[in-house]
Image (spheres, rainbow, N blue to C red):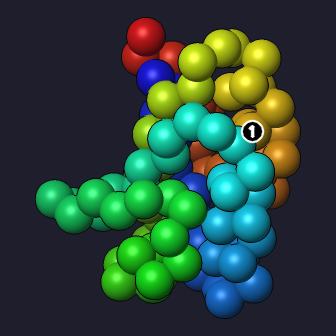
Amino acid sequence: MIVFHVLLDTVDKVKSFVQISSRYPFEIDLSSGRYVVDGKSIMGIFSFDLRHPVEVRVMAESQDQAQAFLQDIDRLIVDQPQDLA
């Protein structure tokens, strides 16, 4: 599992994140406080206070898949991803 934070402070950033996330077969969860939503759910993401970064947990089956996802959303990441495998 890889954990990092993203800033989704505009509608366009949320839409872009969901579109990119939906292309990948593994689970992507976003959390803010004690709330967790599916990273592929635009409605779930909009339930967060998006003025602040949210935590992303990527459960990719391979390191290659995880790296491809990280490259695709690089412009949204606000801290260094950590591998918690």
Residue 44 at x, y = what percent? 40, 76
Q: Is residue 6 left or right of residue 51?
A: right
Establish if 71 lies above or below 83.
Answer: below
Q: Which residue is at 35% across, 83% downward? A: 47
Establish if 75 lies above or below 80.
Answer: below
Q: Is residue 29 left or right of residue 13?
A: left
Q: Quadrant of residue 65?
A: top right
Q: Is residue 37 left or right of residue 16?
A: left
Establish if 75 lies above or below 28.
Answer: below
Badge 1 amino acid = Phe
Q: Secondary structure at mark 1?
A: helix
> Farthest residue in the front direction?
25
Q: Is residue 49 visible?
A: no
> Farthest residue in the left direction?
34
Residue 10 at x, y = what percent? 66, 86
Of residues 52 and 34, the one nearer the viewer is: 34
Q: Is residue 31 left or right of residue 73?
A: left
Of residues 36 and 77, the one nearer the viewer is: 36
Establish if 43 lies above or below 61.
Answer: below
Label 1 packing within 10 angstroms: few (<14), some (14-19), many (20+): some
Residue 62 at x, y = what percent? 66, 14
Q: Where does label 1 land, which residue? A: 69
Image quadrant where one finds the C terminus: top left
Q: Which residue is at 54% across, 78% downward? A: 42
Q: Which residue is at 69% across, 14% downward? A: 63
Number of residue marks: 1
Q: Is residue 40 visible?
A: yes
